[in-house]
């Protein structure tokens, strides 16, 4: 077994307040601990939206001691893209970043204003790029002009990877994440897993998957995030065109990443540790992850949706044989997860 720094996820949806039937902070935190995570950033597309100090404080009050619960505030009021939210108030209430994740702030002038305010306040913007390559190019231009830090979420396309690579070669304040599904799967997974492989941005072609892996290898990507997005089984059982976007990922991310990237010879364990722990901690302003994780990288096991701590079961990785089982998670010196086989 290996002891690693705790994993840091820049991108989760714990659904509370408003959608607790999908996930709540308690179940999401337990899923994070089971997946080896010690720090997570909760996105603001809740109901009500996390666009004011009071809602920030509500979410933070739900911290149950299983994980460092970081809160991301909305860029725009109600995520409607029309008026900027109260950045000063939300910063004072304890947000770690700004995002309209779930939607994209399409108004370029408003995005410039957001970037100016974010820079003045020392806040990171973490942006959902849709359409992906177009918004990636726009955000790079804004970062270059304003000098604000912009983190690009869930990158999936070859074209986007190249844009980010060039921007970083010029020293621009851009960071980027991808997710395990974009380097482990292609759109072919929809045929087998149906809505459990439906997410936004969607799974791409093999050329895109390989480009994402190359971006992980050469440092174009700074982080691997999960975009953990639980839905009810009834919602995902709908026809593909009606089912909601999103899959869960906290409890499968390390094993899928280790198996697809390290076991396959694309990355070293040191590189994967930086992508899942050290780099995302730095991006979000942490000195280091808030704990440690013990993983078994030698014994294969099969992912089973039946054992998840998350309320969500919507994963395309059900039945996949992997290496890298999380055996123990410690957060701030406290054991938050211990596998039943840990002491055997």
Image: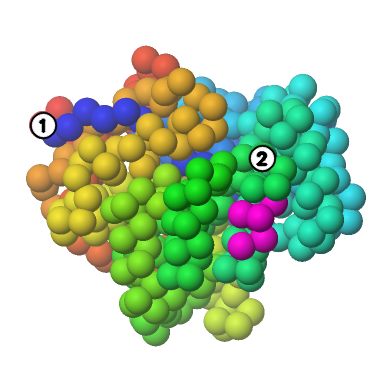
Q: Determine if the magenta segment contains residue 133.
A: no
Q: Which colour scheme is used?
A: rainbow
Question: Considering only vertical position in the picture, is 190 above or below 145?
Answer: below
Question: Which quarter of the image is occupied by the C terminus?
Answer: top left
Disc 2 is placed on an element classified as loop
Which tag is nearer the camera, tag 2 or tag 1? 2
Q: Residue furthest front?
A: 170
Using the rendered view, name the quadrant where residue 321 is placed. bottom left
**Label located before the other in sequence (2 or 1):** 2
Mark 2, residue position: 147
> Residue at coordinates 66% horizontally, 40% vertically from top-left?
147
Other-residue count near label 2 (Cα within 10 Å), few / some / many at <14 / 14–19 / ≥20: some
Question: Considering only vertical position in the picture, is 335 above or below 29?
Answer: above
Question: Considering only vertical position in the picture, is 225 above or below 30?
Answer: below
Magenta-colored span: 137-142
Circle number at residue 344 = 1
Looking at the image, can residue 86 be seen?
A: yes
Other-residue count near label 1 (Cα within 10 Å), few / some / many at <14 / 14–19 / ≥20: few
- Residue 342 relative to residue 194: left or right: left
> Residue at coordinates 83% horizontally, 53% vertically from top-left?
110
Count of numbered marks: 2
Looking at the image, can residue 23 be seen?
A: no
């Amino acid at each position: 077994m290996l002891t690693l720094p705790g994993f840091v996820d820049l991108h989760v949806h714990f659904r509370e307040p408003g959608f607790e039937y999908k996930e709540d902070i308690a179940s999401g935190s337990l899923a994070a601990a089971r997946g080896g995570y010690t720090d997570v950033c909760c996105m603001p597309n809740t109901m009500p939206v996390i666009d004011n100090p009071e809602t920030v404080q509500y979410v933070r009050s739900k911290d149950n001691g299983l994980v460092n619960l970081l809160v991301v505030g909305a860029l725009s009021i109600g995520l409607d893209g029309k008026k900027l939210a109260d950045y000063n108030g939300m910063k004072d209430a304890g947000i770690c970043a700004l995002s309209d994740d779930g939607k994209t702030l399409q108004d370029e002038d408003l995005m410039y204003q957001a970037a100016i305010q974010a820079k003045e306040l020392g806040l990171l913007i973490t942006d959902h790029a849709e359409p992906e390559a177009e918004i990636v190019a726009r955000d790079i231009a804004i970062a270059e002009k304003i000098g604000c830090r912009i983190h690009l979420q869930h990158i999936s396309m070859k074209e986007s990877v190249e844009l980010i690579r060039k921007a970083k070669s010029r020293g621009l304040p851009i960071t980027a994440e991808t997710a395990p599904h974009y380097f482990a799967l292609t759109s072919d997974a929809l045929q087998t897993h149906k809505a459990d492989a439906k997410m936004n941005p969607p799974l791409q072609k093999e050329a895109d998957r390989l480009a994402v892996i190359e971006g992980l290898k050469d440092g174009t990507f700074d982080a691997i995030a999960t975009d953990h997005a639980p839905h009810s089984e009834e919602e995902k059982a709908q026809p593909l065109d009606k089912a909601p976007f999103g899959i869960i990922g906290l409890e499968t991310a390390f094993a899928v990443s280790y198996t697809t990237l390290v076991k396959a010879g694309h990355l070293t364990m040191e590189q994967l540790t930086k992508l899942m722990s050290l780099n995302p901690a730095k991006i979000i302003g942490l000195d280091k992850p808030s704990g440690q994780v013990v993983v078994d990288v030698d014994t294969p096991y099969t992912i089973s949706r039946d054992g998840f701590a998350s309320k969500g079961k919507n994963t395309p990785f059900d039945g996949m044989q992997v290496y890298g089982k999380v055996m123990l998670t410690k957060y701030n010196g406290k054991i938050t997860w211990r596998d039943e086989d840990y002491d055997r």
